[in-house]
Amino acid sequence: MESLGFNEILKRLEYFCAYQERCEFDVLEKIKKLGLQNPEKTEMLIKRLQKDGFLDQKRFVNSYITGKVSIKKWGVNKIRAGLVQKRIDPVIIARGIMEIDADLYQENLQALFEKKIIALKDYKTDYQQKSKVIRFLSGKGYSSEEIYRLF
C-alpha cells in the first residue's frame, strides 16, 4: 500500500479526522493500516494535520469526555482509563476531567443508581442488592467514595 502518495495519504487522513475527533494514536493506527512505514513521513503527516487543525489532543479529550459523560454516563475512572489507552498526556487528561460538569456527573450517577436499584428489587438480601449496585457502578467508572455516598 506504500504506492499511495504522500498527498493521497494526507487527504485520506484529513477525511478520517474530519469525520469525528481523533487523537494522535488513532491517526497513527490509521497510517499503519494505510501501509506507510516511513517514520519521517509519518511525523510529517501528524505535524501537517495538527497545523491544519485536523488533529488536536485537547479538543479530542474534551470531545471524548463530553460524549462519555453525557451519552454513556461513564465515571471518571473509566474515562481516564480510556484516555490512557489512547496514550493521551496525563496533564491533558487531568485538565479535561476537571472541566466535567459536576451537576451532570452527579445526576448521571444518581440516575444509574436508581435504575439499577429498580432492576434489582426482587433480590433476597440488602447485601446482595448493594453488592450488585456497587459492582455495576464501579464498572461504569465511578469511585467507591462516590458510590457509598448514595447509600
Image: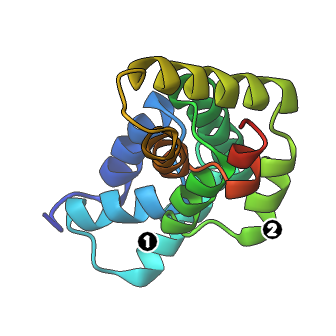
Residue at 46% in and 81% down:
40
Where residue 97 appears, as percent x and y from the top left, is 78, 49
Residue type (three-letter) at the residue carrying disc 2 = Val
Residue type (three-letter) at the residue carrying disc 1 = Thr
Distance of label 2 from label 1 (alpha carbons):
24 Å
- Mark 1 — residue? 42
- In this rendering, the answer to whether 114 lies above or below 86 is above
Residue at 41% in and 65% down:
28
Secondary structure at badge 1 equals helix
- In this rendering, the answer to whether 147 lies above or below 124 is below
- In contact (CB < 8 Å): disc 2 and disc 1: no
- In this rendering, the answer to whether 6 lies above or below 91 is above
Question: Mark 2 or 1 closer to N-term?
Answer: 1
Q: Which quadrant of the figure has residue 102?
A: top right
Can residue 59 be seen from the camera position used here?
yes
Q: Residues within 10 Å of mark 1 (few under 14, many from 20)?
A: some
Q: Nearer the viewer, residue 117 or 30?
A: 117
Where residue 55 appears, as percent x and y from the top left, is 60, 49
Residue at 53% in and 42% down:
130
Can residue 53 be seen from the camera position used here?
no
- Mark 2 — residue? 91
Where residue 14 appears, as percent x and y from the top left, is 45, 41
Where residue 7 appears, as percent x and y from the top left, is 38, 51
Q: Which quadrant of the figure has residue 37?
A: bottom left
Tag nearer the camera, 2 or 1:
2
